[in-house]
């Protein structure tokens, strides 16, 4: 009798079949890992990119436009958030707490990302943050900072270069550590 069933791949054939299927998964994992590492590290001294970031104009939620160059000469914490992002909302009290603690040493600015001004104002009213809020309506500024998710926090040195980046919610303690390591 002739065997009519199919055999499971084994040997060189199994290795070859696995190699054909794995590159997509492996590439996706490698790209995600590389992006996460890049987002959580400093800029590596790429001051050209940093200069472009700090000169990009943005709209303030309470009116007017500005650039991060207006904050030159002092350390700055930049946070990208959205009302629909639960971790963003959860970290806002920690950001406000640290804003109060570092008020005379670090400037805080938040960017409402990819949402309407009304949604941003509703979130600010809910969380009672007192630092300035700007808009990043199309998400292009957050992408330029290297954000791969939200919330996203970047620390800028007084010369405008990026000292640190972090994707994900921060507690008051982890945010304090991040600020102290970057600036003090």
Image (tube, rainbow, N blue to C red):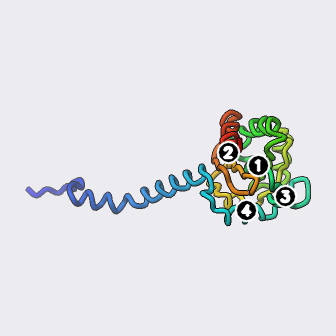
**Residue 82 visible in the shown view:** no
Res 69 → quadrant: bottom right
Report how far apart the C-alphas of labels 3 and 2 lie in the structure.
20 Å
Of tags 1 and 4, which is closer to the observer? 1
Tell me residue 171's x, y (percent). 68, 35
Quadrant occupied by the C terminus? top right
Mark 1 lies on a secondary structure that is loop
Q: Are marks 3 and 2 in contact (CB under 8 Å)?
A: no
Residue at numbered disc 1: 75
Q: Which mark is residue 53?
A: 4
Q: Which mark is residue 182?
A: 2
In the rendered structure, which disc, 3 or 2, sits on the residue that comes first in sequence?
A: 3
Answer with left or right where residue 149 lies relative to residue 82. Answer: left
Report how far apart the C-alphas of labels 1 and 4 lie in the structure.
15 Å
In the rendered structure, which disc, 2 or 1, sits on the residue that comes first in sequence?
A: 1
Mark 4 lies on a secondary structure that is helix
- Local packing at callout 4 (Cα closer than 10 Å; few below 14, some 14-19, many 20+) is many
Mark 3 lies on a secondary structure that is helix
Identified at 72% across, 60% down, the residue is: 141
Report how far apart the C-alphas of labels 3 and 1 lie in the structure.
12 Å
């Amino acid at each position: 009798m002739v065997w009519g069933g199919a055999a499971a791949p084994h040997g060189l054939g199994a290795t070859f079949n696995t190699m054909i299927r794995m590159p997509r998964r492996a590439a996706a994992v490698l790209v995600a890992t590389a992006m996460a590492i890049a987002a959580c590290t400093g800029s590596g001294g790429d001051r050209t990119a940093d200069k472009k970031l700090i000169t990009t104009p943005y709209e303030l939620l309470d009116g007017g436009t500005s650039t991060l160059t207006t904050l030159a000469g002092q350390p700055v914490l930049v946070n990208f958030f959205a009302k629909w992002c639960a971790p963003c909302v959860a970290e806002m009290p920690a950001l406000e707490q640290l804003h109060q603690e570092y008020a005379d040493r670090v400037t805080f600015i938040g960017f409402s990302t990819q949402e309407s001004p009304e949604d941003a104002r509703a979130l600010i009213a809910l969380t009672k943050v007192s630092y300035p809020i700007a808009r990043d309506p199309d998400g292009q500024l957050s992408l330029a900072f290297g954000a791969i998710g939200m919330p996203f926090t970047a620390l800028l040195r007084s010369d405008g270069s990026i000292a640190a980046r972090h994707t994900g919610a921060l507690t008051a303690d982890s945010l304090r550590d991040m600020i102290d390591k970057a600036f003090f």
